[in-house]
C-alpha cells in the first residue's frame, strides 16, 4: 500500500509505503518523491530508517535531493506512525 503525504507547487508528489519487513525482521518504509515531466518522471526514493537513496532518476537537483533528505529525516517518526495507522486521514 502507498499513502499520499503532500504535493508541492512544482507537482512533486510525496508518498510513503506501508511498513515492510526485511528477511532479518527489520521494519522499513519507502518514501518517494516524484514529479511528472514531458518524458516520464523525476524520482527519488528513500528507505527509512536508513535514509539511503534506493532510486534516483530524472532531473532533481542536488539541492532538491538534499531538501528531500531533510524531509525524511525530520519526518521519519511521523511516516512510521502514519504507516502503522494505515495512512493519513483527511477531511
Image (tube, grey):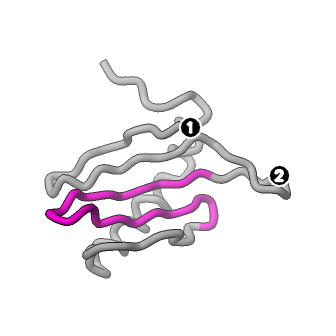
Find residue 33 and report its image quarter: bottom left
Do labels 1 and 2 touch, CB within 8 Å?
A: no
Extent of the magenta region: 29-50
Residue 21, percent across and down? 74, 49
Cα separation between marks 1 and 2 = 17 Å
Residue 58, percent across and down? 29, 73
> 31 left or right of 22?
left
Assign the C terminus to one quadrant of the image. top left
Q: Residue drawn 40% across and 59% down?
A: 71
Q: In this rendering, is residue 65 above or below 73?
A: below
Residue 25: mark:
2
Q: Residue drawn 15% across and 57% down?
A: 10
Q: Nearer the viewer, residue 57 or 82?
A: 57
Q: Residue furthest bottom?
A: 62
Mark 2 surroundings: few (<14), some (14-19) or many (≥20) residues within 10 A: few
- Does 21 appear in magenta? no
Q: Residue drawn 37% across and 42% down?
A: 5
Q: In this rendering, is residue 24 above or below 3?
A: below
- Does 31 appear in magenta? yes
Q: Residue drawn 51% across and 71% down?
A: 53
Q: Residue furthest top?
A: 91
Q: In this rendering, is residue 79 above or below 84?
A: below
Q: Residue furthest right?
A: 24
Find residue 44 and report its image quarter: bottom left
Mark toward the start of the polypeptide (1 vs 2):
2
Secondary-structure class at tag 1: helix
Residue 83: mark:
1
Secondary-structure class at tag 2: loop
Residue 84, percent across and down? 61, 34
> 41 left or right of 1?
left
Amino acid at each position: 500500500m502507498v499513502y499520499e503525504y503532500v504535493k508541492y507547487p512544482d507537482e512533486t508528489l510525496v508518498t510513503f509505503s506501508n511498513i515492510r519487513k526485511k528477511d532479518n525482521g527489520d521494519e522499513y518504509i519507502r518514501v518517494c518523491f516524484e514529479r511528472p515531466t514531458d518524458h516520464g518522471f523525476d524520482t527519488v526514493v528513500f528507505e527509512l530508517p536508513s535514509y539511503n537513496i534506493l532510486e534516483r532518476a530524472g532531473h532533481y537537483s542536488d539541492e532538491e535531493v538534499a531538501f528531500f533528505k531533510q524531509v525524511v529525516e525530520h519526518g521519519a517518526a511521523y511516516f512510521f506512525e502514519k504507516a502503522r495507522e494505515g495512512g493519513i486521514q483527511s477531511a
